[in-house]
Image (spheres, rainbow, N blue to C red):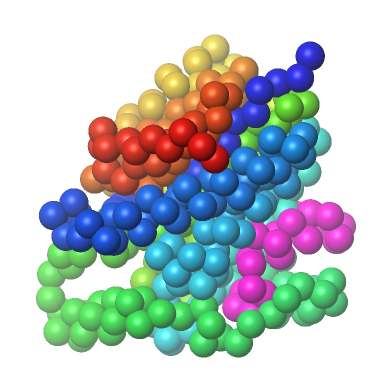
Amino acid sequence: MSQAPILALHGGAGTIPAASLTPDLTNAYHDGIRTALAAGHAVLKSGGTALDAVTRTVVALEENPLFNAGHGAVYTTDETHEMDAAVMDGATGRAGAIAGICGPRNPVLAARAVMEKSAHVFLAGEGAMRFCREVGLEFMPSAWFGTERRLDALRQEMARRAANSADTRSDADRHGTVGAVALDVHGNLAAATSTGGITAKTPGRVGDSPVIGAGTWADNATCAISATGQGELFIRVAAAHEIAARMRWGGQSLAEAADDVANNVLAPIGGSGGLIALDAKGNLSLPFNCDGMYRGFIAPDGIAHSAIHREDWRIQAST
């Protein structure tokens, strides 16, 4: 008997404040979420794997300049881009991750290539770039990844630091990530995450997104997770694996474990952010402890849901 497929995504925790979102920009975010959901769900509807579905979903988000991944990635203090990504297959436990790269058009495809075309799990820096060229990934010039919006954010942050002014940035200015989790008709889970990092990060900084067990996790026995937020804190508590461990050894449900980690483990130590989590029974949880999280899902009924802040779900019947 086949499993009814499920797909969920996030476009980053820490959203633009509701008062600052124009109707056009609000619609653009919802359209971006639904476009990515449709791309991944098309894979699942045709009997494709969860791994293919999350990859396709994240590629769509990397192509959208509204989100901090691929085209639209934030800048380092050197006005450069350093992108990170990871994928994990819940059926086999195989994983691939990449960090500190700029050139491959879709960092999530680089992470998947590490998993499928190398003997390793995690590649970074110049060696990672050489590997991406060797396996034939599509490259783009560095200018393709940037946008005026991201460059303005960097310059404002550098000016604030030069003036030694108080940090009044919102969560939306501090971090941003994209990710997806899926359950396919075969009952297998997968997760993928991609990010440009944080605005004005120190070159060489790596957050939780490519760290297996921190920002990305998939295991058919427990759950698939993609996290978004203040990466240093997610790494310190191994957030994604902590949820899986609470389910495996503590007997918690997916919702209990995900909510506990988001609100009772991360929040008390300043770990602002959220995550999307899915288990092999089809249970879905999307907790966050900040003002909002760009997010969406398609359940077995095939209806697409998208949201930005709390209790603002939009529903679209056809996908």
Identify the residue at image location x=43%, y=62%.
67
Q: Is residue 102 magenta?
A: yes
Q: Does the magenta stretch include residue 95?
A: no
Residue 310: image quadrant is top left
Relative to residue 213, is residue 121 depicted above or below? Answer: below
Identify the residue at image location x=57%, y=58%.
60
Q: Is residue 208 visible?
A: no
Identify the residue at image location x=37%, y=55%.
29
Expressed as whole percent of the image width and height from the top left, the position of residue 111 reads: 70, 59
Relative to residue 16, is residue 186 depicted above or below? Answer: above
Identify the residue at image location x=67%, y=75%.
104
Relative to residue 208, is residue 286 depicted above or below? Answer: above
Q: Is residue 24 left or right of residue 150?
A: left
Expressed as whole percent of the image width and height from the top left, the position of residue 179 reads: 53, 49
User: Which stretch appears magenta?
Assistant: 101-122
Q: Is residue 71 visible?
A: yes
Expressed as whole percent of the image width and height from the top left, the position of residue 303 reads: 49, 31
Q: In which quadrant is the C terminus drawn? A: top right
Q: In this view, does 184 lie to the left or right of 31?
A: right
Q: In which quadrant is the N terminus drawn? A: top right
Q: How many marks?
A: 0
